[in-house]
Amino acid sequence: MLDKKKQAIAFASIKIIDFYLNSIKTDFGLLRRVGESLGVISAKKALKLLICGNLFVSGEHGIFIKENQNKKEIIREIAKNIHQFINSNHKLKNQIDAFLLKDFPLKSLSIANELKKSGYHAFSVEPNMKLEIQEHWVNFNDYLGAVKTKFRVKAKRALTLSKALSIEEVTFQNIDKQLPKMTALYEKVAGNATFDLGLFNLETYRDLKKQFGNNYILKTYWLEDEIVGFVSGIVNEKSLDAHFVGIDYKRNRTHAVYQRMLYDYVEIAIQLKLKTVNFGRTASEIKSSIGAVPENLTMYLRHKKTVKNKILKLFLQRVQPTPFDQKFPFKK
């Protein structure tokens, strides 16, 4: 988006996907039936969805507005321009069913709520689980010393169970040999997700490692000569943003693979002197046992057709994040 002097003041990242009703798993069974009965979504036909935001990362990554701008006015213009872009393309105009702008945290809602004036409906989604790294944590033992006895015992048990695991850095040079197994493990995790908008192509890791080098974290977990898990993430200024993981669930029971991964994210952030770890959505309860707290996120959705958009509002009123038992591991 340009100002009167033709200088860039904002941009929006968009992607078009096919959204299938069966991507909503059992926890949302009632919503699936309600959505289908109201004619908002169909079990037989994909919903062609234009998304503004990063499909594979939780958080506000779809819109950037330069400082000292009228952000409310700009976000209204962005919504308007997205619709004009679709309407000016005859093929897309006939294909697109709905528009989704995703993942606005609480601090951005005073601006993002301007989208309601353009016919968008707000709804809450699963929170981003976020851990604050304390400045006085010099190493992982400092973190362990900050948690209550119950959670410290749990952490040490996970570290003991996972002691047989060896960890290998994935580099641009050795990634080709590991990608097939990593992909298989990731697909198992993705298959267990209650809600997803698409599968991530792990071949992208090559480009991420090439472009970001050591700022892109990619590690595999081995039990003897077999990969049983992997973690990925990016150093984003003073934050470690966790991306995808892969887990061999059979090994997870005996070797606490996933818990070890979560603690390793914490240790990496401490070593790099970062301020936060963004763990993303899913598995909120176990992440809270590590010390992460929920950062609530809001999405905005609009159906292209006026009547269905009014019905959509009724459907979205029933969409709620899955409740979980928030743990509080840190000492007061």
Image (spheres, rainbow, N blue to C red):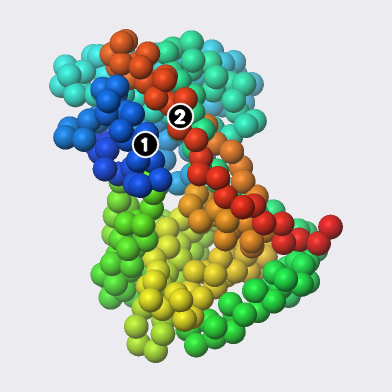
Q: Which residue is mark 2?
A: 318
How far across and how far down the image is residue 100, in percent? 39, 28
- Quarter holding the C terminus? bottom right
- Residue 212 in sight: no
Query: Does residue 57 appear to the left or right of 184 in the view shown?
Result: right
The residue positioned 21% from the left and 35% from the top of the image is 43
Specify few, some or many for label 2: CA neighbours under 10 Å numbering under 14, 14-19, or 20 or more: some
Figure quadrant of residue 220:
bottom left
Q: Nearer the viewer, residue 330 or 271?
A: 330
Q: Secondary structure at mark 2?
A: loop
Residue corresponding to mark 1: 30
Q: Is the residue under label 2 in contact with that under label 1 (CB below 8 Å)? A: yes
Which dot, 1 or 2, sits closer to the camera? 1
Residue 308 versus residue 296: which sits nearer the camera?
Answer: 308
Question: Can the viewer see residue 331 in this picture?
Answer: yes
Quarter-of-image position of residue 290: bottom right
Q: Amino acid at mark 1?
A: Leu
Q: Earlier in the sequence, mark 1 or mark 2?
A: 1
Q: For the residue labelled by badge 1, is the local secondary structure a helix, a strand or a loop?
A: helix
Query: Dot 1, crowdedness within 10 Å: few (<14), some or many (≥20)?
Result: few
Image location (x, y in percent) of residue 286: 57, 60
Q: Is residue 221 above or below residue 121?
A: below
290 shown above or below 293:
below
| Distance CA(mark 1)–CA(mark 2) | 9 Å
Horizontal arrangement in the rendering, residue 247 relative to residue 178 (left or right): right
x and y, in percent, of residue 139 in the image:
72, 72
